[in-house]
Image (cartoon, rainbow, N blue to C red):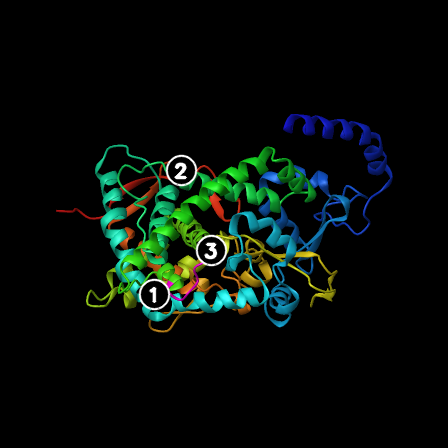
Amino acid sequence: MADLIFTTLLLLLSILSPLVFFIFSITRNPSSTKKTPISYPVLGSIFEILKNKHRRVQWVSEILTSTPNLTFTLHRPFGYRQVFTANAANVQHILKSHFHNYPKGDVFRATLRDFLGDSIFNADGDNWKFLRQISSHQFNTKSLRRFVENVVDSELSDRLVPILRAAATGESVVLDLQDILQRFAFDNICKIAFGYDPAYLVPSLPETEFASVFDDSLRFVSERFNSNIPFIWKIKRALSIGSEKNLKISVGRVREFALQIVREKKQELKEKSSLESEDFLSKFLSSGHSDEGFVTDVVISFILAGRDTTSAALTWFFWLISNHPEVENEILKEITEINPEEKIYDEVKNMVYTHASLCESMRLYPPVPLSTKSALNDDVLPDGTAVKKGTRISYHPYAMGRVEEVWGEDWAEFRPERWLEWEEKWRFVGRDPFTYPVFQAGPRICLGKEMAFLQMKRVVAGVLRRFRVVPAVETMEPVYVSDFTSKMKGGFFVKIQDRVVHP
């Protein structure tokens, strides 16, 4: 059936080719700049879109940073439009001052519902407010301290460090650090959110069906988002063919895994009514939220948030410092000056230079390169861009980290000092969240922001005080790719070298 549809589309294309050629010959969008893609009637900018489909994030970023107001409208076929912006004033308008007019929207929710259901990442209005309120309880100071001291540190000392040490003592051992960090993050989020240990990061580095189908689900959902003709994926879903058939299978397996976690936790709470579980799922179920479908949505959303974002940030961080020994030396200096009597929670909070280095890494390689909203009503952005009701509008953190007017002529350089001031010691100087919306901003600012930094800094300290991370290929130029979250294409293969002699 899929082949039949593909053949039919090719036939239609051959019939339309003369018309396309005619349009090419006589019609051009007079408002197009050198960088802005040319838009044709009916077809929009489909040719430029297809030409750049394997580097979509970089392509949009190049367009944005070449426009005077850091905003442009991409015309897709059949009149579909999407506004992209890297303008901080526009971002503040969307995420804060006119927050009510820019929800996720029906298109966004419909695109993600098969995967995320009605979880917080796919909710608007009162449902979002409710989920936001109950989720926020997990991210108070006590919870963060418990997370770092009990979960991250045990996973670090009992699993990550031994695997890296074994690699350091072996001859010509090469690890995919991106895979290792994803396993580490997956174990962590499952433990703190569900009280469940998947033991994904163990010496054998087992292949797991769940990790595979989760990645497949993200890839297929991303294809939906980037579809040039959105109704095509809906037709494929209705006919259960191609990528939509595969998405259905993958999501089904993901939801089976999540549902199993929910049911096991419900049984555990039933058998041990006096059990004082601190994980999020136990608190959620104990508060009376027992609908399995809804709770399963919550489980999947937490795995998505905790598994891919921090691991992506750390992957790019370790690659950047491997090419900047002066930064690595400053971080090592900070690590060695840590008071051994300090609690782990306080230790990582005081790692100012490391914090700046992580911010700088995520400026260049944000874990989520863009975020999309939908206009509830007609509006005009601060830069004068008109937005029609129902238009998708995406702000672009990847492009925003490359705006010369904001970051200077040296924006392409990895320089943590741009986040610091020296006052007898380093003092962190942050940017407003609308200029640097890596963790979103406004009412929907990421609840797990502090947790993410604490986890990342603990990993950085735990790894760098013991090892050097060296790319297996010295001259590698990694490629930034993104499905739902970003990755390093093909993985990040490294050799581990001992920094000190262990007894």
Is any part of residue 431 visible from this angle? no
Task: Quickly name the residue at label 1.
Answer: 144
Q: Earlier in the sequence, mark 3 or mark 2?
A: 2
Q: Amino acid at mark 2?
A: Glu
Query: Magenta stretch mostly in which secondary structure?
Result: loop
Task: Quickly name the residue at label 3.
Answer: 362
Is 325 above or below relative to 27? Answer: below
Determine the image quadrant of residue 45.
top right
Q: Total marks drawn? A: 3
Residue 41: where, in percent of width, then height? Answer: 81, 44
Residue at the image point whose x is 32% and y is 45% from the top: 469
- The answer to which of 462 and 414 lies nearer the viewer is 462
Circles 2 and 1: CB atoms closer than 8 Å: no
Task: Quickly name the residue at label 2.
Answer: 209
Query: Which is more foreground, mark 3 or mark 2?
Result: 2
Q: CA distance from mark 2 to mark 1?
A: 30 Å
Q: CA distance from mark 3 to mark 2?
A: 30 Å
Residue 225: where, in percent of width, then height? Answer: 61, 47
Residue 37: where, in percent of width, then height? Answer: 72, 46
Q: Amino acid at mark 1?
A: Leu
Residue at the image point whose x is 69% and y is 63% from the top: 376
